[in-house]
Amino acid sequence: MKQIAILSGKGGTGKTSVTASLASLAKKRAVLVDADVDAPNLALVADPEQFFHQSFVTSKKALVHPDRCQQCLACLGPCQFDAISLSFDYPYVNPIKCEGCGLCAYLCLIEAITMEPHTSGFLSASKTRWKNNLYHGRLLPGGENSGKMVTAIREKAEKYAKKNGVEFIFIDGAPGIGCPVIASITGCDLALLVTEPTLSGIHDLERIWALVKHFQIEAWVVVNKSDLSLENTNKIKKFCQDNNLPLVAEIPFSDDVVKS
């Protein structure tokens, strides 16, 4: 089983389209992972039928119990995140602002504030129009632990792939070089770096290549919309040559991509 992460240093280069193309060719030989848990969009082109859905709980948030509260308001001032305010004369914890530090619960001597498990998002699995499984997730607004969610999704995909003898796992990574991207590439056999012939595309190719090189993962480059700027495409070619990066494909701009 080979795991291939399709990445880009920025959004909009076409990595999801490349992932979908690979999935269409591989069909049941591949399992898909959408590792962009903040803004997943592989499902938009995969036409999936969901068969699994569960809450993703990795943190705790403060909860005020009005029936126990004596309205001493000792919890209001110390919160460094301004997460506690008055609501109908009782303290109220804003779950988006709350960082789960537990200070308010520690200060409440009568235990009117407790730390409760908090749902950060949801994990899902679906069958795509290409007859392969897609494992994906979505963080709720203000949700934390994107790296942990990506890891949880990958674990489910790997378990299925090993059990069913699937040859490939295609991981559609998040844009950028942050936590979800790092969680996407850990343990991968190959990183497919999708870029475009723009100045920002070249800059962010350099960033994602530096990250992949740091983790000692083999990388190939794909230039999407390569005919939009031959000058910048040549700059990408030179960057690949200087860094011994295989340039494996140049995809011209075409309306057929949208139609497919």
Image (cartoon, helix red, strand yellow):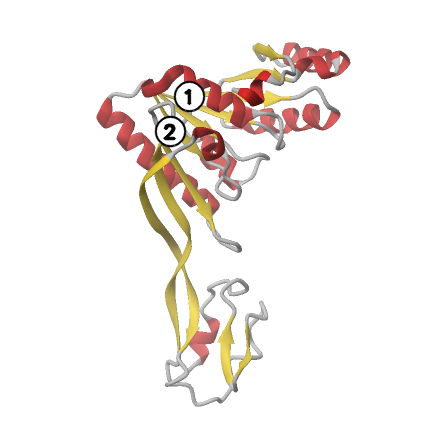
Q: Is residue 254 visible?
A: yes
Q: Nearer the viewer, residue 226 or 254?
A: 254
Residue 152 in the image: x percent, y percent?
Answer: 36, 41
Q: Secondary structure at mark 1?
A: helix
The mark that comes first in sequence, 1 or 2, is: 1
Q: Nearer the viewer, residue 56 or 50?
A: 50
Residue that numbered label 2 is attached to: 128
- How far apart, in angstroms, are the residues tagged by discs 1 and 2? 9 Å
Taking depth in this image into account, of 51 and 164 the one nearest to the observer is 51
* Mark 1 neighbour density, 10 Å: few (under 14) some (14–19) many (20 or more): many
| Quadrant (top left, top right, bottom left, bottom right) of the N terminus | top left
Amino acid type, residue under disc 1 in the picture: Ala
Residue 23 is marked as 1
Residue 126 placement, left or right of 37? left
Dot 2 surroundings within 10 Å: few (below 14), some, or many (20 or more)? many
Left or right of 104 in this view: 239: right
